[in-house]
Image: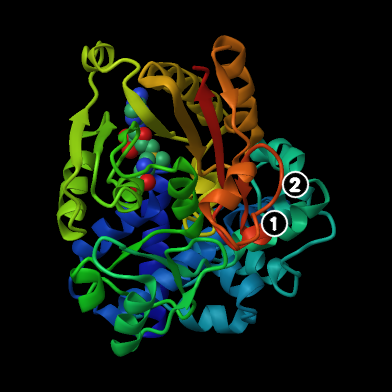
Amino acid sequence: MTPAGRIQAAIELLAALDAEPRRPADAIANDYFRARRFIGSGDRRAVSELAWGAVRQRIRLDWHLARIGAQPTPRLVLAAQLLLVEGWPPQKIAGHFTGDRFAPAPLEPGEVELVRRLAGTPLLHAEMPEGVRLNLPDWALPGLRARFGEQLAAEAAAMEAAAPLDLRANLLRTTRESARLALAGEGIPAEPMPFSPWGLRVTDRRPISATAAFKEGLVEVQDEGSQLIALVTDAQPGMRVADYCAGAAGKTLALAATMGNRGHIVACDVSATRLEGAGRRLRRAGVDNVERHRLVPGDKWRKRRGRSFDRVLVDAPCTGSGTWRRNPDARLRTTARDLAELSAKQSVILDDASDLVRSGGRLIYATCSLLPEEDEMQIERFLGRHPDFVVRPVLALWAELCPGVPAPGEGPYLALSPAGHGTDGFFAAVLERRP
Ligand SMILES: C[S@@+](CC[C@H](N)C(=O)[O-])C[C@H]1O[C@@H](n2cnc3c(N)ncnc32)[C@H](O)[C@@H]1O
């Protein structure tokens, strides 16, 4: 592909994303490339980088375009990205928008004028409102400001940086050190993580799904924050554990490892597709103490199993604001309405899941959100409705769970963030049913 052909493909990809604003960008990109198998892997990477660059900066690029009275068409968004982020001069843009075979159509006179007006403008403009300057959507700003106060700018910057590749050594098959050596033997250097006792961080990102270490189930891809949620769940050998929102079993796998495959885990979810995906991962990891259960409306299962679990993990559906460094499109897709709907859903799920916790057992509530509305405020409301539960301060449990490792913060809850801990943003509260 020529450089101009790559630009045209990136414009088409941006148009596909704009046409389905509620759908995850990676799913749209997969469809786009599947329908164009003639695009080779190198070109595919280059096209994705161009389009993803614009997605990462979209809030700012749209602001710049609105300031000069332009509609954010995919052509102008990409031109703005090349001008303001990549530092291209207008002549270079015109030199690629030529209308030649595979190249974007020539700039129209109106577009030429807009490109001229944008040229030379700094990406971070003095007149930008705070949210745009920080690259954060308006609806999330109050919550993030409440969470981070003076650290907001540092956290916003960390949310823009690319995330490392985090792996969890599967202790059912290996030790962390043996997994590290196996990866090194395949040319993938990885370092032990600061907090997770099972974690390995690959700073130089590269695909690992083709490695023998991955295929043999020695390692799983899992952000350190997600590993710590499993850690504070404290699922021990022989316990009865429910992973109530198990999805494709990311945390179930880690729980099975802390249990040494002994005891019983029920991995629940409303999504049959996700539970099906979980099956494959469980087999690869050598996990055999997990039963999968699809939750349906009016489910009798919950009643039958009421108050019988030692641990119930609720890894709730949430805005995912803690994962924006990995999913740059999510900050564009999610709205204030989603936040309100998700928050209501989280309350219902928490109430339902709490029925399963035995007397003296624990309910662990987790999100990958940085917004208090989905985190501590959710817990405060739950405790108001359920006086039979008390908070077990997570960081007081830490010394027992991870001896010798400094706790990642203080306070009753686990609250991890990209700048503070180098992890995705995760929240966890441990609640115990009074005996
Ligand atoms: C954050 S994801 C879970 C990720 C998973 N625990 C992991 O570590 O890979 C939230 C999950 O909640 C599920 N979910 C949504 N509504 C639910 C409900 N009412 N009850 C149980 N699970 C639900 C979704 O299908 C989704 O898989």
Considering only vertical position in the picture, is 346 above or below 401?
above
- The residue sitting at 27% across, 79% down in the picture is 41
Q: Is residue 110 visible?
A: no
Residue 349 in the image, given as x and y percentages of width and height: 41, 22
Tag 2 near tag 1, CB within 8 Å? yes
The yes-or-no answer for disc 2 within 8 Å of ligand 1 is no
Q: What secondary structure is marked by label 2?
A: helix
Vertically, is 116 above or below 306? below
Residue at 25% over, 75% down:
213
Residue 299 sits in quarter: top left
Q: CA–CA distance between discs 2 and 1? A: 8 Å
Q: Position of residue 348 (x, y in %)?
A: 44, 17
- Judge the density around disc 1: few (<14), some (14-19), many (≥20) Cα neighbours within 10 Å: some
Image location of residue 279, percent across then percent down: 16, 47
From this view, report whether residue 183 is shown above or below residue 252: below
Q: Position of residue 306 (x, y in %)?
A: 31, 15
Residue at left offset 54%, top offset 28%:
431
* 405 or 4, nearer to the observer: 405
405 or 101, which is in the foreground? Answer: 405
Question: Which quadrant of the figure shows ligand 1?
Answer: top left
Q: Which residue is mark 2?
A: 148
Query: Where the N terminus falls, by quadrant?
Result: bottom left
Crowd class of label 2 (few under 14; some 14 to 19; many from 20; radius 10 Å): some
Q: How many marks?
A: 2
Three-letter code for the amino acid on which mark 2 is drawn: Phe
Q: Give the side of residue 238 with respect to residue 153, left or right.
A: left
- At x 56%, y 35%, the residue is 429
Identify which amino acid the numbered label 1 is placed on. Answer: Glu
Which residue position is annotated with label 1?
155
- The residue lying toward the viewer, choosing from 11 and 70, is 11
Nearer the N terminus, badge 2 or badge 1?
2
Residue 264 visible, this orientation = yes
